[in-house]
């Protein structure tokens, strides 16, 4: 089954070097804090953690707005507890094949992953062509065209920045949202 989703890949940048410099225990403490923040922000923003990828994760959102808010909130909140490491991310929206009930395959998934790999520091990168609508308080700043492994030609990319409006803690509308698959 093909489903429309926004895919996010997040990576704790500098984790391997941090582990080498400070040891497994220190790295484990930062990773534990990072995962706690990811879970909290995902819950608040209504996105699903599809899988953990070592010092990163793949997140899936039904609504692109929720994914954008998740990424920017995560970057800001993890900055407080994950220093000296930073969070980089890539987002892409499109249809993907729901594979074996719990994984996704498709161009949007691959693009989000490649954008995360391309991001530096605390960047949240997204293809210009995938922007549907940005939440209030969020801006898209042109990065220009980038070459991504596995994609023909260059892709016009933006960096997302800003502070999304506060999450609505009202949960009574959750039953009206499309189900997470």
Image: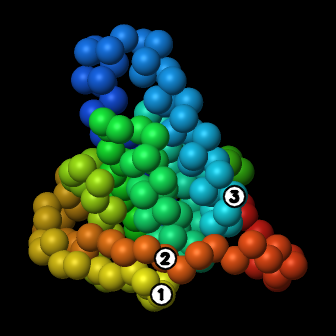
In the rendered image, the quadrant that contains the N terminus is: bottom right
Question: Between marks 2 and 3, how big is the CA–CA gap?
Answer: 16 Å
| Residue at which label 1 appears | 136
Relative to 46, does residue 113 appear above or below in the rendering? above
Q: Residue at x 22, y 73 (%)?
A: 157
In the picture, the disc for residue 43 is 3
Q: Residue at x 25, y 74 (%)?
A: 158
Do callouts 2 and 1 mark residues in contact (Cβ within 8 Å)? yes
Q: Quadrant of residue 172?
A: bottom right
The quadrant of the image that shows the C terminus is bottom right
The disc, 2 or 1, on the residue closer to the chain's N-terminal end is: 1
> Where's residue 81, x and y in %?
46, 40
Categorize mark 1 by other alpha carbons within 10 Å: few (<14), some (14-19), many (20+). Answer: few
Which percent across, then down, holds residue 107?
39, 63
Tell which tag, 2 or 3, sits nearer the viewer: 2
The residue most toward the front is 80
Residue that badge 2 annotates: 164
When the figure is inspected, residue 36 is found, relative to residue 173, above or below; the finding is above
Spatial distance from mark 1 to mark 3, Cα to Cα? 20 Å
Estimate the x, y position of residue 120 in percent, counting from the top left.
21, 51
The residue carrying pointer 2 sits among few (fewer than 14), some (14 to 19) or many (20 or more) residues within 10 Å by Cα, namely: many
Disc nearer the start of the sequence (2/3): 3
Residue 48 at least partly seen:
no
Q: Secondary structure at mark 2?
A: loop
Q: Is residue 174 above or below residue 91?
A: below
Residue at 56%, 30% (x, y): give it.
32
Res 129 visible: yes
Question: SS class of the residue under badge 1?
Answer: loop
């Amino acid at each position: 089954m093909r489903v429309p989703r926004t895919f996010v890949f997040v990576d704790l940048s500098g984790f391997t070097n941090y582990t080498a410099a400070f040891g497994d225990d220190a790295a484990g403490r930062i990773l534990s804090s990072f995962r706690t923040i990811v879970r909290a922000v995902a819950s608040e923003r209504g996105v699903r953690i599809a899988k953990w990828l070592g010092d990163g994760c793949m997140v899936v959102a039904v609504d692109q707005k929720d994914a954008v808010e998740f990424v920017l909130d995560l970057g800001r909140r993890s900055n407080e507890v994950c220093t000296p490491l930073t969070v980089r991310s890539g987002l892409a929206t499109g249809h993907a094949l729901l594979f074996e009930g719990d994984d996704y395959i498709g161009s949007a998934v691959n693009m989000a992953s490649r954008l995360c790999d391309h991001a530096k520091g605390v960047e949240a990168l997204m293809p210009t062509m995938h922007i549907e609508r940005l939440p209030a308080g969020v801006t898209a700043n042109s990065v220009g065209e980038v070459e991504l492994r596995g994609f023909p030609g260059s892709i016009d990319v933006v960096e997302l920045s800003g502070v999304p409006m506060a999450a609505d803690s009202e949960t009574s509308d959750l039953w009206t949202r499309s189900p997470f698959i």
